[in-house]
Amino acid sequence: MRLAGLALAGALSLNLGGCGYNDFQRLDEESKASWAEVLNQYQRRADLIPNIVATVKGEAAFEQDTLTKVVEARAKATGIQATPELVNNPEAFQKFQAAQGELSGALSRLLVVSENYPNLKANQGFQDLRVQLEGTENRITVARNRYIKTVQDYNVLARSFPSNLTAKVFSYAPKPSFTVQNEAQISSPPAVDFNKK
């Protein structure tokens, strides 16, 4: 009787090995770690912004509207509670993503406008902050790419047979990934007119 119980337990463990449960645990933890790194880089960017704004304010003639948009976008982006559970809520994730995209756009406009101010371009403190910001944007891209890859691996497991049965039993739903906000705009080629003056 005891031997039969051990044989049954052994057979069940062999069958469970192919169900993907442990893979779900591993990939779920990897996606959480990747997401934490994305948040870490977004926080790094948010921490740089007050220094950039303070440096730019030193340029008396700088466009106040541009600065206001950066400050407002930062407040909006940091106002969203970024928790590990955020990635499991598609609506909250999209809202977070939109706020971060708005902040990226505001910062890009700030850097473009700053090119029109020679004193600001010559300010070593501003140039150092700009380099740090560009480096942070690159880190954000790398962290997002890692997150996208771990989510892809997790979602393939959640949708593949027989692990999709385990996903249904244990409620492992596919996770949302980052998307491009203006996909329609970037999919069409830019219009180039060399005849404009």
Image: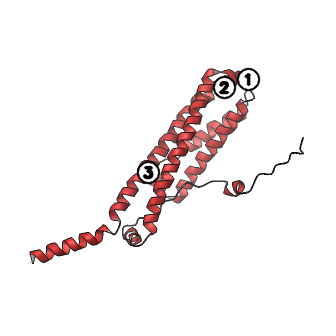
Q: Which residue is disc 3 drawn over?
A: 84
**Foreground: disc 1 or disc 2:** 1
How crowded is the residue under tag 3: few (<14 C-alpha within 10 Å), some, or many (20+)? few
Rendering quarter of residue 121: top right
- The total number of labels drawn is 3
Alpha carbon separation for disc pair 2 and 3: 35 Å
Figure quadrant of the C terminus: top right
Would residue 157 be found to the left or right of residue 135 on screen? left
Asked if residue 79 can be seen in this view, the reply is no
Q: Residue at x 51, y 36 (%)?
A: 44
Q: Are marks 1 and 3 in contact (CB under 8 Å)?
A: no
Alpha carbon separation for disc pair 1 and 3: 43 Å
What amino acid does circle 2 point to?
A: Lys
How crowded is the residue under tag 1: few (<14 C-alpha within 10 Å), some, or many (20+)? few
Q: Disc 1 on helix, strand or loop?
A: helix
Rendering quarter of residue 179: bottom right
State the image coordinates of residue 18 (x, y, percent, origin top left): 33, 69
Q: Disc 3 on helix, strand or loop?
A: helix
Q: Are marks 2 and 3 in contact (CB under 8 Å)?
A: no
What amino acid does circle 1 point to?
A: Pro
State the image coordinates of residue 155 (x, y, percent, origin top left): 46, 63
Q: Which residue is disc 2 drawn over?
A: 57
Q: Which mark is residue 118?
A: 1
User: Which of the two labelled residues, at mark 1 and mark 3, occupies the earlier sequence position?
Assistant: 3
Q: Disc 2 on helix, strand or loop?
A: helix
**Above/below status of 130 relative to 164:** above
What amino acid does circle 3 point to?
A: Pro
Closer to the camera in the image, 35 or 76: 35
Rendering quarter of residue 196: top right
